[in-house]
Amino acid sequence: MSLRCPNCTRGLSPSDYQVAGSLRGDLTVVGHVSIPAQMRMQGQLICGQLTNQGEFVGRARVGGPVELAAGSQTRGLLACQSLHMDRGAQLRARAAIGSMDEPVRPRLTENSR
């Protein structure tokens, strides 16, 4: 069976995915993506649910919940339906929570320079 995103026509995997080692690149999964402790992902991620216990750097669009475990690091852009952070999780990102819209980068105006 082959699934495609109706918006961008990228191929979609209907299963869950667990990062093993270090992953650099883009990943599109309909299911749950898990980044275990000591593992790292860098790139663009589109998925249904995300659990980060390791490190994520990049742009993530998550159709459901995001869980950031103690000791995890998340940096970049994040759009998701809900966010849960354990004490000790680090989040350094522009985020849109409760929406699938991309976080907006602030525009510099003449007065703000």
Image (spheres, grey):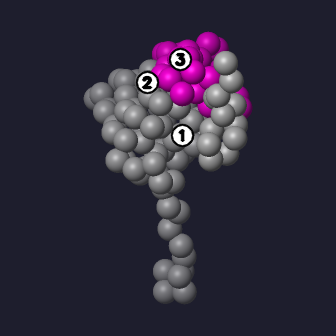
Q: Residue 87 sits in which quadrant? A: top left
Three-letter amino acid code at disc 2?
Thr
Q: Which residues are magenta?
A: 13-38
Residue at x 55%, y 17% (from the top left corner):
15
| Viewer-nearest residue: 94 or 6 | 6
**Which is nearer the eye, 20 or 10?**
10
Which residue is the site of mark 2? 51
From the image, which quarter does the N terminus lie in? top right
Of residues 74 and 15, the one nearer the viewer is 15
The 10 Å Cα crowd at callout 1, few under 14, some 14 to 19, many 20 or more, is: many
Mark 3 residue crowding within 10 angstroms, few (<14) / some (14–19) / many (20+): some
- CA gap between label 3 and label 2 equals 11 Å
Q: Residue at x 52, y 41 (%)?
A: 61
Name the residue located 64 percent from the left edge and 28 percent from the top edge.
Answer: 3
Query: Does the magenta portion include 99?
Result: no
Tag 1 residue: 60
Query: With respect to residue 47, does 97 lie above or below?
Result: below
The local crowd at label 2, few if under 14, some if 14 to 19, many if 20 or more residues have their Cα within 10 Å, is some
Measured along the vertical axis of the image, is residue 92 above or below residue 12? below
Give the mark nearer the N terminus: 1 vs 2: 2
Report the disc number at residue 16. 3
